[in-house]
Structure formats: C-alpha cells, structure tokens
Amino acid sequence: MKKLIAFFLLTATMLSLYADAERISMIIGSTKSIQTPFVIESFRIIPGKSDKIKVEAGESQLRIVGCAVGEVTLVVSGGGMQKDYIVTVKSNLAKTLKKLRTDLDSLTELDISINEDQIAIRGTVTNPDHWKHLMKVLPNYSSQCVNFAVFKPSAETVLNLKKLLQEAGFQFCEPGQKAAVGQLSMQISSDAVVLTGELYSQKDLDKVMQLLATQPWLDIGGQGDSSKGRVRCMTSLSVVETLLQVDIVYAGIVLDNSDALGSNSTPTLSGSFGIIYDLVSGRGTGKTAQFGGNMDATVGFLTSNGVTRTYNAGHVTFANNDPKGGSLHTGNTVYVKVNGLENGSLQNIKYGLEIKVTGGLVSPNRAKLTLDLKNSSLVSASEDSYNLQEDTTSQTVFCDLDKTVVIAGSKKISQATKNSGLPILRSTPVLKWFVSNDVDNQSEISLLILACPRLVKANPDVQIEIPLDQQTAPTYRDSKRNNRERMEENKRHRGSLGWLGWFNW
C-alpha cells in the first residue's frame, strides 16, 4: 500500500513539474542562454545519462548546447526555489530537407516537405527501380523523416514483365480471349497481378516461377503491401501432359540428279540451296535444313523435283521430354550363325535402320530433338556365317512444330549395305536403294532423313454417335411384331439350327 501511495505521489509530482515547466526548442549544434529568476545553486538533467544537451551554469544564467536529437528535462535549484525546463533538440530540418531532395532528385513523383518536427514523404512510386532507390536512401534519414509513399506498378512495368516472359519463349493470348494450351494470360488489378495458363511441361512451369522471382516488387502467393513496395502476385499454372509425335521419312537421292533440286520451288526453305545441295551431295554431314512446310508438303516438294525414292518409315510417339523417347525400326530379322557372338551360335539378328528420337518442347511452337540412327548390316563371312556390322550417328536439331527438318545420313550406310552381298537386302525398305538392280552402277545414292515434330492433341469433347434411327430401328421393328409372327419366323431355324431362332438377324 505504501509503495502504491509513493507511486501516485511521484506521478503527481512529475505531472506538476511538466505543467509548470518551461519548454525550450533548439536545433542540434546550436546554443541557447537562459536567465533564471534566482541564483543557481545546482542543476540536474533527467534522464541522468542523457547526451542530448550540455549545460554550463553561471550565477543566474544557463548556457545550453544541443548535442543530439531528443528531449530531456533540466531541473535548476537555488535559494529554496526550483525551475524546470523541457528541452527539445531538433535537427536542422531545412538543411536535411535540401539534402534529402537532392538524394531523391530522380523520383519526381514524390512530395517531400516538413511536417512539424519531421520530414514527410508522400506520393505513388510506379517504377520498381525508383522504389529500390527510395529504400536505399531512407535509412540515412530514419530519425528525421517518415515515409507515407506507396508502390503501384505502372502499365510500363507490367508490360516489361510480360516482355520478359515473351523473350523467354512464352506466348500470351489476345486480351479477352481464353488462353490455349502453352499460352499465358495476365490480368491486372489495382492491387494484384494474376497469371494463368496450362503449360506443356514442369520445366516450363518452373521457368515461369523463376522469372517471376526475379521481380522484387511481386509478392508471389502473398497478400502484398504497397507501403513496402510489394504487389500481390497470384498464379494459376498447371502442366498438361503432352505427347510429341515425330513423323519419319527416308529419302534416297541419286547424286547425278541433284542439280535439278529446286527447279520447282514449293515449300520455302529456311536455308540456302547451297546447304541443301551439301546435304544431297553427301558433303553436309552434321548439317541440317528446315523446310517451311509439313511432311506432306516436303515430300511433295522432293517428288516434284525428281526425288522418287522416299519411304514413309512411320512415326515415333513419346511423352514430352521423356528421356526414354521412342524408336522406329525399318528392316527385318534373320536367324543366322553370327561370328563373334557366343562362338558362332545361331542368333535372331535385327538388321536394317533403327532410329531413336528423344527430346521435347523448348517453346510452345519449337522442339529440340536428338535423333540416334543405327544401321545394322550383315556381312558374309563364310558360306553359312555372317558378321554383324553396325554404324551409328547422332544429331541434335531444333525444329518448329509442323515443319520438316532435313538431316544428312551417314555415308557408311550405303557402303556397308553394298558390301554385305546379301540378296535379302533387295527387299528391305531403304537399304534396297543401295543394292537394287534398277540403280545405275555409276550412280551414287545419298540418304536424307526427314523429321517433322507435332503435338498429339486429344479432344475429349469429340464423340462419334450412331444415328438414332440406326440404333433403335431393329428394336422398334421387333417390338411391333406379335408372338405368331415371331413363331412363323422361327420355323426357318428348326432342326439342328433351331437354336438360331433365339436370335434376330
């Protein structure tokens, strides 16, 4: 109880002191003299260890020096009297204001002014770089100013974000349109950026999120805070499992006729005819060229230019970016004794051309493909035994969807085939070009590989329906017959085939 009474007495005393105290305001670094109504005997500063002011006392005069920004109480006593002063030390706001405006000179959207004993910053910052600069400057004035500025991205800032995603290979749907698979849609509100879309792979989704993370003004998955320069970013992105189908066609070109290539210019070529000629002539191993049309248009182009040896090998289908990919075998198998394999034991040997395709989309309209070609040939070693000879080559290409890329085949394929001496190759697709009797012995054939990637799109909304009259006509017709008519019809099926009467034909 005594402690409580003492507390109230102390509080009352302090309130009385503050009520009777004289207020003194001064700028840091300045000096102020105070005349007291009595002879000074002593003085003290509350709090005792404050460094805000320094005091020098004369007979009836105080000299106060402002040392640091803050507020203290100066209690002066003498002749049985006491005088209290509340001393507030302020910064030189005018000088500080001038310096702050210089530091923020590039941020013309801000209003910087003195508000009583502080500097107030107001305005809307629309550029992320400007906000970054503001946050860098403010800590130097933390005790002298208060920031009321907020961040709101401008249309240019949002367009720069969209451009960043586009340069990374992502496409956006037209405003007001629903985004197709592989496209993004962006909506902007006063306090949020909403990004939606269905992407072809997890890699694409991760790439989008990584690009968003480079924008410090976006608060991904959060609520955002304009006073901290953060705008809420809401994402609704998903991955659609996509199948990639690569059509494969082999083309054999007689080099004597290669000069005629390009006489009929039907689809366009992304590359010069010099590259195409190198591919045809066999000098273009490792080179590729892309036709501006799909497989049908490309084969038609080659045919119209005298290339009659084409073989539609088929297509390879695999999940987008599946490391296993898919393979296609053009040839046959033979049961022979093979030297070098388990002491010449009989083996089922696969010969011919085998192509393995791996890869996936690098953008909604472009794919990266790796084609591994293996030619397996049987070379006669003796009357009843053979050597298995393999030639492999690998090529990585970039190709637009629904466009055809042309790849030069290995020269060793034709050499190995001609040297095999096996009559069975004359009936083997592709390989027969190098050994058939209809090929001029003086002519040389070059092998080209045509590959055309495209997406396999399944549409669950498409249904094949049987017309109603075809579905119901037999049942409807049967329902109108009476039992007598049914019995008369069943007489045709009596005897050993009487059980057939149970069925309607």
Image: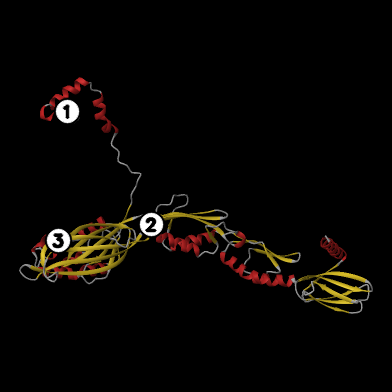
Q: Which mark is residue 333?
A: 3
Earlier sequence position, callout 1 versus callout 3: 3
Which residue is at the front of the view, 59 or 304? 59
Q: Which mark is residue 449?
A: none
Q: Which mark is residue 200?
A: 2
For the residues labelled 2 and 1, say whether their Cβ atoms are less than 8 Å apart: no
Q: Amino acid at mark 1?
A: Gly
For disc 3, the neighbor class at 10 Å (few under 14, some 14 to 19, many from 20) is: few
Earlier sequence position, callout 2 versus callout 3: 2
Quarter of the image where one finds residue 465: top left
Q: Amino acid at mark 3?
A: Thr
Q: Position of residue 332 (x, y in %)?
A: 15, 60
Q: Residue furthest left?
A: 383
Residue sitting at x 47%, y 63%: 211
Residue sitting at x 22%, y 72%: 283
Residue 343 higher or lower than 206, as above or below: below
Question: Badge 1 is on which residue?
Answer: 501
Q: Residue furthest top?
A: 484
Please say whether residue 360 is visible from this viewpoint: yes
Which residue is at the front of the view, 341 or 149? 341
Q: Position of residue 500 (x, y in %)?
A: 16, 30
Query: Circle 3 — which element?
Result: strand
Which residue is at the front of the view, 111 or 140? 140
